[in-house]
Image (spheres, grey):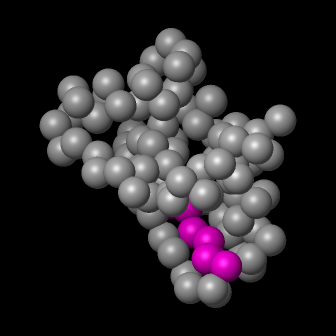
């Protein structure tokens, strides 16, 4: 499990490392990676992604059940940040599983 930086510039640098495309494409790549992860997470129970909008601002939430059926929820203001926060919370075994099923 990684700790993500609180500094916005450091967080942006972390997103750039995890999503190696130009910044305008971060949310698109994150959406693809989150969809792949949700397919894997869905094997253990309900899993989903939702967005709420207040004015021009979005807020993203992903929810799922662990293999032990514990409910999990994670929030972020962008899809890219949501993906990076999710990735930081995964164990190395879970990361390997996602990489192995990425194709």
Q: Residue furthest bottom?
A: 69
- 49 relative position to 41: left or right: left
| Residue 51 at least partly seen | no
Identify the residue at horizontal 28%, vertical 35% (top origin): 11
Residue 67, x across and y down, in percent: 67, 79
Tell which of 17 and 93 is nearer to you.
93
Tell which of 53 and 13 is nearer to you.
13
Q: Is residue 1 above or below residue 19?
A: below
Q: Quadrant of the N terminus?
A: bottom left
Q: Which residues are magenta?
A: 59-67
Give the main secondary structure, helix, strand or loop, of the magenta stretch: strand
Q: Residue furthest top?
A: 22
Residue 24, x across and y down, in percent: 50, 18
Identify the residue at horizontal 51%, vertical 58% (top origin): 90
- Number of labelled discs? 0
Q: Quadrant of residue 30?
A: top right
Q: Is residue 23 above or below residue 18?
A: above
| Residue 94 at least partly seen | yes
Tell which of 6 and 101 is nearer to you.
101
- 55 relative position to 80: left or right: left
Is 29 part of what is drawn in magenta? no
Residue 42, x across and y down, in percent: 76, 68
- 7 relative position to 89: left or right: left
Identify the residue at horizontal 62%, vertical 72% (top origin): 64
Q: Is residue 69 above or below residue 93?
A: below
Q: Quadrant of the C terminus?
A: top right
Q: Quadrant of residue 74?
A: bottom left
Identify the residue at horizontal 80%, vertical 71% (top origin): 43
Q: Residue furthest left?
A: 7
Tell which of 51 and 66 is nearer to you.
66
Residue 71, x across and y down, in percent: 55, 82
């Amino acid at each position: 499990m990684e700790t993500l930086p609180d500094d916005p510039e450091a967080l942006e640098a972390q997103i750039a490392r995890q999503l190696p495309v130009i910044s305008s494409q971060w949310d698109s790549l994150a959406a693809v990676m989150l969809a792949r992860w949700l397919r894997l997470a869905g094997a253990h129970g309900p899993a989903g992604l939702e967005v709420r909008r207040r004015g021009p601002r979005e807020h993203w939430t992903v929810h799922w059940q662990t293999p032990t059926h514990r409910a999990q929820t994670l929030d972020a203001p962008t899809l890219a940040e949501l993906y990076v926060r999710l990735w930081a919370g995964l164990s190395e075994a879970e990361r390997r599983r996602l990489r192995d099923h990425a194709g």
